[in-house]
Amino acid sequence: MQAETDFAEFIEVWLHESMGVDMAMTQTLKMLILCVIMGFLALLFWWIGQMIINRVIERLIRKTSTDWDDVLLEQGVFRKLGHVIPALVVSELSPVVFSDYPSWIPTIEQVTDAFVLLIFIRVLISFISAITVFLHRSPKFRDKPIASFTQLAKILIWSIGGIILFGVLFGKNPLTLFTALGAVSAVLILVFKDTILGFMASIQLTMNDMVRIGDWVSVPQYGADGDVIEINLTTVKVANWDKTISTVPTYSFVSDSFKNWRGMQESGGRRIKRAVNLKISRVKFCDQEMLSRLSKISLVKDYIEERKKEIEKYNSDKQIDTQSSVVNGRRMTNIGIFRVYILNYLRQNPRLNQEMTCMVRQLEATEKGVPLEIYCFSAIKAWVDYEGIQSDLFDHILAAVHQFDLEIFENPAGSDWQKIN
């Protein structure tokens, strides 16, 4: 410190005696010169620090086999830490530069301390960001809502750091400020309601494994239907299939209902559940001519032969007169054979998962006919392929229905009414 004081006195003597500056202006000019020198030294040391960080430390980090130090470098933790150097230079030289204005020194030191504290807050924020990136790169945490917890940590750091920063700048005890904030806790809870709800929801989503990044979710209330691309403290971003992005409050995944398609994606197939409506008036018993004709269809040939023997034996054992009326005894129907045909067609389809439920069932008849519902699972779960498999399946069913003397129900079109007229 003695060397700096001597240097300041040398500048003062040089200005007054050598340059002939008036004594009243000497102190001001001396302070300006020292400020310039101090600023130059601060920039010089900052530049040297950045050079060391960007070249020496970066090269050392790139040579290591670990990833965490690379992430710290990418998030600028070391670079931001280097901003402390000029603040330390100013803090050390300010007593010399402002020796003629001692009342200024405490204020400058407060500002410098606040700047150093701000730098450390930013370093902590960058460190948390680095933790987020590092965990997202890990397979164990890639689909977890890490951002929710790191965002909360950032909010706490900024809140606590901001209070301490305010106390440093204005010379107040931070504990006093924290006590004052406790008195307005109700207001703070109201202001940070969404944050608090989002944090609690994030914990529940994580603990119960309800939503992961990459899950396909459907949230009808918010028009969201697509893949989850981000889960943070207050919102969940969903990339919809139409390439739009929906932002859904995190708490909605706890308070409201939603559909997560992860179970389907992790299973062996994707469900196909669709019905075709048949005209009731076309449903009838099969006569010998129809049975003979349908027996030529390979998928139901064996079934017709077996059922024919079974029915003939039953009617014979019960001595039922099947000639007097078609409703006497047991008979096959065209809709029953058609149902067996569809089921056999599904079972021989290589693009369906045969290990999962596969059935064709008749639903309750309505004013729109008799529904035959196809219930099976596609072996391929990708959306485009799935829709192709489903379309091919029903293309065949709709084309084959007429072979069984059945007809698809449909409401009359305008052309139908014109034909009647």
Image (spheres, helix red, strand yellow):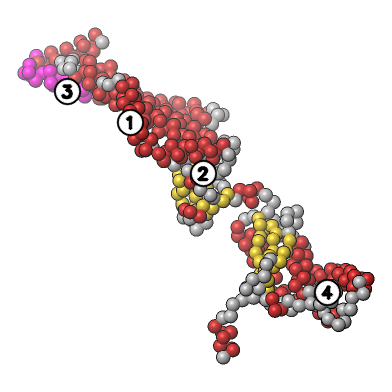
Q: Label 3 crowding class (10 Å Cα cut-off): few <14, some 14-19, many 20+?
A: some
| Dot 1: element | loop
- Left-right relation of 97 to 81: left
Residue on which the image places disc 1: 184
Alpha carbon separation for disc pair 3 and 2: 62 Å
**Depth order, front residue of 58/181:** 181
Residue 336 visible at all: yes
From the image, state whether disc 4 or disc 2 is nearer to you.
4
Ranked by sequence position, the earlier of labels 3 and 2 is 3
All told, the count of numbered labels is 4
Residue on which the image places disc 2: 254
Ranked by sequence position, the earlier of labels 3 and 1 is 3
Q: Amino acid at mark 4?
A: Arg
Ranked by sequence position, the earlier of labels 2 and 1 is 1
Ranked by sequence position, the earlier of labels 1 and 4 is 1
Alpha carbon separation for disc pair 4 and 3: 112 Å
Image x and y of residue 250, in percent: 47, 43
Residue on which the image places disc 4: 331
Residue visible at 46% across and 40% down? Answer: 198
Alpha carbon separation for disc pair 2 and 1: 28 Å
**Depth order, front residue of 318/377:** 318
Q: Is residue 250 above or below residue 65?
A: below
Magenta residues span 17-36
